[in-house]
Image (cartoon, helix red, strand yellow):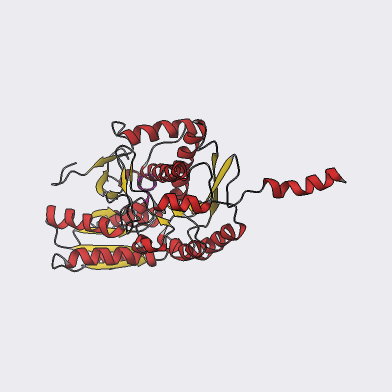
């Protein structure tokens, strides 16, 4: 009877309190792992996992190993909200990390905020996540408004283009991009030459292309995921739309280049993290080694580098929270962060600033499917 009672009690003894035990701390990731945005969730998971395993190999944080539990929301807001609610209700993760997407974050962030659960490093530049008064949201990347301004500054101010069209995903994500492009053009006394939309989690872009093609734009700027964007560019080339194509970082650079194949050369993508192949940058060198140790077959990329930086941010807050770790002390440590310098990726936070980095730079896909920086002034 005593043995039975001990066995019955064991699950309660071993159960993590808000994701924390004496030997482990668990994070939850709710993101897309299937569908047209799958490479984004997979890339974020890869980078976060590499950072966590790097810390684990060094003895963990204050003796605790780090665990990442990933759940697939298919890039659908309702599904994402249900999963986040289950994470909150189960209460066995210290926080949420590495979410993917604006429409999903719009559905899940209020749930996490109401429960005061940390919401760390979402892969989106949506402005509503930059409201530091929520107290539980901590961003790494620049906003979409910063990216879209960088596009128009390059296309109009540097390249002298007069006609800009926009393809965007018909949801909250796309409309944030629409607002950013519109504002950047208005600043220069311009308006969109044409715009077209497609439905999230589809590649139905032909109608949008036919609308945009009529305007004969100098450039088409694009706010979408890699599969529909690739379909648009390939169809554009078939229909002889001679324009410069420019994409937002969310597109997933490596996935887009792979989808485009031989038709990707010259396509421009804005980036919010350092160049993942430049090992002269300290954080990139560390990321490369961590990635190799975690998965020898994994290739470096912009998305997984962002995931790695997000993972390192969480680790820094765990270190600052000390040995007596609770969700409350972890949140306090996150809120107390000021400058987190990883060597080439410097994050600066403040009382009213929950976004670490503001950097944006442009890259283009090369003939071999790789990437090269776009140098201000037009070269590369």
Residue 305 image position (x, y, % from top left) = 38, 42
Residue 152 image position (x, y, % from top left) = 19, 58
In-image side of 232 versus 296 (left or right): left
The answer, for residue 2, to whether it is visible in the render is yes
* Residue drawn 26% across the image and 45% down it: 364
Q: Compared to 138, does 78 lie above or below?
A: below
Residue 274 image position (x, y, % from top left) = 30, 41
Of the pair 275 and 1, the residue shown nearer to us: 1
Magenta segment, principal secondary structure? helix
| Quarter-of-image position of residue 215 | bottom left
In-image side of 154 versus 197 (left or right): left
Residue 245 image position (x, y, % from top left) = 26, 54
* Residue drawn 78% across the image and 49% down it: 8
- Based on the picture, tell me whether residue 258 belongs to the magenta stretch: yes
The answer, for residue 266, to whether it is visible in the render is no
* Residue drawn 55% across the image and 44% down it: 25
Give the magenta part as a residue range: 252-259
- Based on the picture, tell me whether residue 239 belongs to the magenta stretch: no
| Quarter-of-image position of residue 47 | top left
Q: Compared to 379, does 208 lie above or below?
A: below
């Amino acid at each position: 009877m005593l043995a039975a009672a001990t066995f019955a009690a064991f699950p309660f003894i071993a159960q993590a309190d808000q994701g924390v035990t004496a030997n482990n701390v668990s994070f939850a990731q709710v993101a897309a792992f299937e569908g047209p945005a799958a490479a984004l969730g997979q890339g974020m998971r890869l980078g976060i996992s590499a950072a966590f395993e790097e810390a684990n190999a060094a003895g963990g944080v204050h003796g605790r190993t780090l665990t990442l539990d990933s759940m697939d929301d298919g890039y659908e807001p309702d599904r994402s909200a249900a999963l986040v609610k289950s994470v909150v209700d189960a209460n066995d993760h210290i926080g949420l990390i590495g979410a993917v997407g604006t429409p999903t974050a719009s559905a899940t962030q209020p749930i996490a905020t109401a429960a005061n659960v940390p919401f760390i490093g979402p892969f989106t530049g949506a402005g509503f996540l930059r409201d530091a008064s929520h107290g539980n949201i901590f961003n790494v990347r620049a906003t979409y408004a910063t990216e879209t301004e960088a596009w128009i500054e390059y296309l109009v101010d540097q390249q002298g283009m007069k006609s800009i069209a926009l393809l965007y995903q018909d949801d909250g994500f796309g409309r944030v991009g629409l607002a950013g492009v519109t504002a950047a053009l208005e600043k220069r006394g311009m308006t969109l030459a044409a715009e077209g939309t497609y439905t999230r989690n589809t590649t139905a872009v032909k109608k949008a292309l036919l609308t945009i093609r009529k305007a004969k734009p100098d450039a088409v700027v694009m706010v979408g995921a890699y599969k529909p964007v690739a379909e648009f560019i390939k169809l554009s080339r078939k229909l002889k739309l001679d324009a410069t194509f420019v994409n937002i970082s969310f597109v997933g650079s490596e996935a887009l280049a792979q989808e485009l194949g031989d038709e990707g050369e010259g396509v421009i993508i804005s980036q919010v993290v350092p160049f993942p192949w430049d090992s002269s940058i300290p954080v990139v060198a560390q990321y490369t080694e961590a990635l190799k140790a975690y998965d020898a077959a994994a290739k470096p990329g912009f998305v997984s580098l962002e995931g790695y930086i997000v993972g390192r941010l969480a680790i820094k807050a765990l270190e600052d929270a000390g040995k007596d770790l609770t969700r409350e002390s972890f949140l306090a440590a996150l809120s107390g962060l000021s400058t987190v310098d990883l060597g080439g990726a410097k994050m600066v936070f403040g009382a009213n600033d929950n976004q670490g980095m503001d950097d944006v730079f442009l890259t283009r896909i090369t003939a071999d499917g790789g990437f090269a920086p776009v140098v201000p002034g037009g070269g590369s």
